[in-house]
């Protein structure tokens, strides 16, 4: 309770944003207005959690069945590497559109549409026929993920300005839970459905469809939508040249390098273990362990980060875990598999840390939206070559030595720029100089 109180006091002092939950109602309608706001706030919490759960199964379910998909579609190693590079490409291309769409339609409506796109993409891609159709269906799902990725910090900042750390932690924990669940149960579910990889991938569309439901009343509720737009118009939004901010660039590069590590892990780690002699089911469980480490840590790290004036020590600790995990994969991939899975899972918690820093490095909701779009779109562009290079190096070297060396080499600059991004300053101040 003391931690929560300190966090709320500190956040109230550092932001002037008032989200829809804090919109004033006329005096005569105070009880009704308060009840409506409370109802809408609870619905937003449910929507945030369900949406976050659906932001990674499209990727980790494919990682668990990548060998079966490659065989079924006749993919080479290089094409499979391209497939693992599609997520960051879509996140970069479509994520940059999110702030403009949110200003026009409202963040809730855009996230609702994103969940619809995820549902459709997951249902279509296994049955589209051929590699091109599979890529197109994946791109549709990833488009929905992209806009939701960018707008989640915006929704948290707008609806919960006094609880950024706690709500970011809840959102990150739900995301990690969905990621781990998809990695853990995709192979067993596929076996239950007769061993058909198409059914094993398509089943995740049901969970995505459930995430659409909480946003529908918010989209149809004109009062809530109007409050969101009024809040957006009421925020001071002077011209912000985000590219003038060194912190914004450092955060974008940090985001890109941690995304590179995460998507290489999600796309290839199970295959590394399988090539070392680990069974397919156990390899899926090891990937799940890596993902599930983010469930508790994704809730704890944002709250700890908001208490620190500088997030550099957290960046260093996560990076050291990553370096140790890569060393283990190189020297004893099967012998110490569970330990390496845990260490890489801890290292992957750079993602919730990056999301938290997005909320901390800007003072206003408009600044968060701009910083989130810039950091994520630029970061995902940076991350595109990584998974593809891993596939190419694996195919041409015939082993995992060079890919692991690449992963290790990328972790060092990730730690350096993360320390720079963790400094206590805001992009508004830097861009105004």
Image (cartoon, helix red, strand yellow):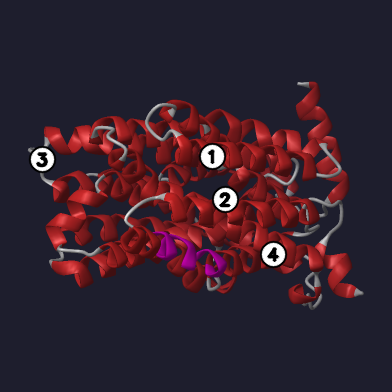
> What residue does disc 1 label?
327
**SS for dot 4:** helix
Disc 4 or 1, which lies upstream in sequence? 1
Q: Is residue 220 left or right of residue 223?
A: left
User: Which numbered mark, 3 or 2, is in the foreground of this view?
Assistant: 2
**Residue drawn at point x = 31 percent, y = 36 percent:** 284
| Numbered circle sitting on residue 18 | none
Disc 2 or 4, which lies upstream in sequence? 4
Q: Is residue 81 left or right of residue 280?
A: right
| Numbered circle sitting on residue 195 | 3
User: Which numbered mark, 2 or 4, is in the foreground of this view?
Assistant: 2
> What residue does disc 4 label?
371
In front here: 191 or 275? 275
Which part of the image, by quadrant, shows the C terminus? bottom right
Asked whether the beta carbons under mark 1 and mark 2 sit within 8 Å of each other, the answer is: yes
Q: Main secondary structure of the magenta part?
A: helix
Asked whether the beta carbons under mark 4 and mark 1 sit within 8 Å of each other, the answer is: no
**Residue drawn at point x = 66 percent, y = 63 percent:** 253
**SS for dot 2:** helix
Q: Residues within 10 Å of mark 4 (few under 14, many from 20)?
A: many
User: Which numbered mark, 4 or 1, is in the foreground of this view?
Assistant: 1
**Residue drawn at point x = 10 percent, y = 40 percent:** 195
Q: Which residues are magenta?
A: 381-390
Q: Is residue 224 visible?
A: no
x, y percentage for residue 377?
57, 68
Residue farthest to the right, as pictured: 433
């Amino acid at each position: 309770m003391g931690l929560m109180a300190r966090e709320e006091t500190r956040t109230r002092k550092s932001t002037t944003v008032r989200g829809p939950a804090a919109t004033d109602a006329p005096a005569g309608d105070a009880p009704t207005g308060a009840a409506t706001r409370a109802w809408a706030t609870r619905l937003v919490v449910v929507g945030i959690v369900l949406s976050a759960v659906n932001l990674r199964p499209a990727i980790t379910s494919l990682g668990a069945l990548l060998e079966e998909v490659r065989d079924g579609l006749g993919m080479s190693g290089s094409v499979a590497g391209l497939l693992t590079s599609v997520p960051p490409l879509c996140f970069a291309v479509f994520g940059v559109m999110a702030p403009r769409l949110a200003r026009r339609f409202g963040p809730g409506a855009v996230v609702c549409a994103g969940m619809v796109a995820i549902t459709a993409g997951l249902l279509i891609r296994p049955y589209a026929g051929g590699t091109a159709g599979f890529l197109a269906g994946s791109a549709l799902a990833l488009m929905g993920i992209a806009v939701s990725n960018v707008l989640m910090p915006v929704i948290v900042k707008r609806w919960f300005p006094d609880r950024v750390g706690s709500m970011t932690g809840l959102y990150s924990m739900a995301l990690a839970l969905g990621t781990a669940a998809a990695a853990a149960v995709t192979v067993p579910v596929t076996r239950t459905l007769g061993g058909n990889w198409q059914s094993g991938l398509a089943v995740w569309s049901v969970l995505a469809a459930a995430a659409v439901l909480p946003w529908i009343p918010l989209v149809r509720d004109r009062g809530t939508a109007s409050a969101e737009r009024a809040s957006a118009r009421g925020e001071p939004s002077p011209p912000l040249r985000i590219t003038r901010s060194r912190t914004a660039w450092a955060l974008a590069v940090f985001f890109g390098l941690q995304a590179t590590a995460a998507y290489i892990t999600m796309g290839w780690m199970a295959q590394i273990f399988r090539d070392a002699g680990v069974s397919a089911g156990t390899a899926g469980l090891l990937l799940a362990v890596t993902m599930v480490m983010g469930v508790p840590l994704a809730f704890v790290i944002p709250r700890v980060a908001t208490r620190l004036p500088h997030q550099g020590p957290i960046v260093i600790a996560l990076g050291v875990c990553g370096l140790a995990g890569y060393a283990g994969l190189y020297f004893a991939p099967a012998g110490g598999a569970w330990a390496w899975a845990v260490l890489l899972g801890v290292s992957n918690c750079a993602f919730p840390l990056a999301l938290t820093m997005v909320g901390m490095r800007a003072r206003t909701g408009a600044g968060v939206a701009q910083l989130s779009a810039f950091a994520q779109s630029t970061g995902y562009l940076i991350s595109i070559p990584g998974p593809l290079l891993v596939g190419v190096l694996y195919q041409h070297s015939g082993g995992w030595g060079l890919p692991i060396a690449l992963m290790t080499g990328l972790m060092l600059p990730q730690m350096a720029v993360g320390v720079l991004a963790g400094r206590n300053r805001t992009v508004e101040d830097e861009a105004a100089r």
